[in-house]
Structures are given as C-alpha cells and as structure tokens.
Image (cartoon, grey):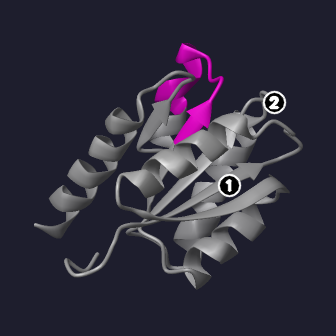
Amino acid sequence: MAHNRKIRVLIAKPGLDGHDRGAKVVARGLRDAGMEVIYLGLRLTPEQIAEAAIQEDVDVVGVDCLSGAHMALFPKTVQLIRGRGGKDILVIGGGIIPKKDIPKLKEAGIAQIFGPGTPIDEISNFIKANLASREK
C-alpha cells in the first residue's frame, strides 16, 4: 500500500444472505475513518468478489455473512483472491460467526472476524495496524 493514498476497502456480501445493514454500517464507518470504500452489495459469488478486489486494486476485502454459509464462502473467496494475484490483500470477515468456526476461518486466510456490535474504531485500527506491519 502506498503511503500517499487512502486505504482502499471492498465490502461485499457473498451468498444468498439478503441482510446488509451491518455491512453498510461498516462501509460508512470505514469511509468516515478516512478510507476509500467500495460497497459491492448483496448476493455475490466469491468469483465476483475476487475479480472486483483485483480490478479495484484494494488493500482490504471485508466479507459479511449472516446465513451460515461462511465456512464455504469465506475460504473460497480468499482462495480466489490469492489465485488472481491478490496475495497482499487483507481479508476480514464479519457477521454471525460461531466462535468455534473462527480458528478454521483464520487458517483459511481470514485475518480477523468482527461480530455484530464491534466498534468501527476496532475494525479501522485493526486494518491500519495490519497494513502498516506489512509495509515494514
């Protein structure tokens, strides 16, 4: 990530989940924290998310899932992003994710999971700290 530009974040809802209020709150909050945010919307495939992440040259992809399909959708999204050359893209997740699934998701390349009610500052600070440590 270049020092002279805003952090670029892509927020997307993979799968058939039709509830996006939380994703929109996070998108607005990260924008208000000074990041450039692209909100892709609902009912996307992992392929669509990965393609957009590469085309938009983002630093971060945030995927959100409330439908219970996170164990299939999140790892597939990471795999496709990496396969398209996005090895440096930070991938974070959100939604209603059982605690028992979080270690498996992290092993699959999701850097962090943020559940409902997570303060925007916590998400923003995690992104900034993680990207800063990658630049060293």
Q: What x and y, as percent, mark residue 76? A: 68, 54
How far apart marks 2 and 1 lie (CA) works out to 14 Å
Using residue 134 as the reference point, say whether residue 55 is left or right of it. Answer: right
Judging depth in this view, the residue of 113 and 104 nearest the camera is 113
Count numbered badges in the picture.
2
Which of label 2 and label 1 is nearer to you?
1
Residue 89 magenta-highlighted: no
Q: Which residue is mark 2?
A: 67
Using residue 80 as the reference point, say whether residue 86 is left or right of it. Answer: left
Residue type at the position of mark 2: Ser
Q: What x and y, as percent, mark residue 55? A: 60, 84
Residue 94 magenta-highlighted: yes
Q: Which stretch did the figure color magenta? A: 93-104
Using residue 17 as the reference point, say whether residue 80 is left or right of it. Answer: left
Q: Residue at x 49, y 80 (%)?
A: 57
Q: What x and y, as percent, mark residue 85? A: 50, 79
Give whichever of discs 2 and 1 has the lower sequence position.
1
Q: What x and y, as percent, mark residue 116? A: 57, 23
Residue type at the position of mark 1: Ala
Q: Residue at x 74, y 41 (%)?
A: 72
Q: Which residue is mark 1?
A: 12
Label 2: element kind: loop
Q: Residue at x 35, y 60 (%)?
A: 34
